[in-house]
Amino acid sequence: MPKPTLVVPLRPLARVACVQAPVPTPYGLTWAQTAGRACVVCGRRLTSGAVSRGWIYGQHGAHRLDVEVWCCPAPETR
């Protein structure tokens, strides 16, 4: 009989504007996020008013994973 596992509920993330949230690492980003078509923080599709968050630098062996990332505009400008 397997041992029961402890399930800990996760706290909901605080509501922070995407422009203020920390930028993730390049590992695990979707194709749309690395192509600049989706917000790097929340994953929503970007249209007008996107804010550049700069470049994320990464490497996997000999392969460079550098990508320019964008995020949703500040809530007051939506």
Image (cartoon, rainbow, N blue to C red):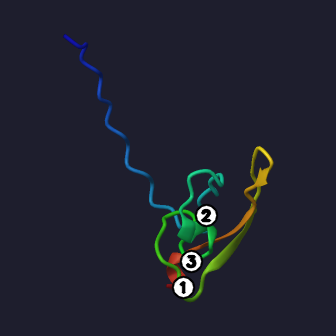
Residue underneath mark 1: 77
In this view, the mark in front (3 or 1): 3
Quarter-of-image position of residue 40: bottom right
Residue with the mark numbered 2 = 20
Outermost residue toward the bottom in this view: 48
Q: Are marks 3 and 1 in contact (CB under 8 Å)?
A: no
Element on which disc 2 rests: loop
* Residue at 62% across, 54% down: 24
x 24%, y 17%: residue: 4
The N terminus lies in quadrant: top left
Could you say which is closer to the camera, residue 45 or residue 32?
32
Residue nearest the viewer, comparing 37 with 20? 37
Identify the amino acid type marked 1.
Thr
Q: Is mark 3 on a helix, strand or loop?
A: loop
> Is the C-beta separation of discs 2 and 1 under 8 Å?
no
Question: What amino acid is found at the position of numbered circle 3 in the picture?
Answer: Arg
36 relative position to 2: left or right? right
Kindly report the distance in space between the C-alpha atoms of the residues bearing marks 3 and 1: 19 Å
Crowding around mark 3 (Cα neighbors within 10 Å: few <14, some 14 to 19, many 20+) is some
Tell me if residue 62 can be seen: yes
Q: Residue furthest top?
A: 1
Q: Which mark is residue 37?
A: 3
Question: Distance from label 2 to label 1 (Cα)?
Answer: 14 Å
What SS does tag 1 mark?
Answer: helix
Question: Within 10 Å of the Cα at label 2, are there few (<14), some (14-19), or many (20+) other Cα atoms?
Answer: few
18 left or right of 1 in image? right
Q: What amino acid type should be assigned to the residue bearing mark 2?
A: Gln
Q: Is residue 18 visible?
A: no
* C-alpha distance separating marks 2 and 3: 19 Å
Vertical order, 36 against 59 (above or below):
below
**Residue lying farthest to the right in this orientation:** 62
Measured as percent of width and height from the top left, residue 60 is found at 73, 46
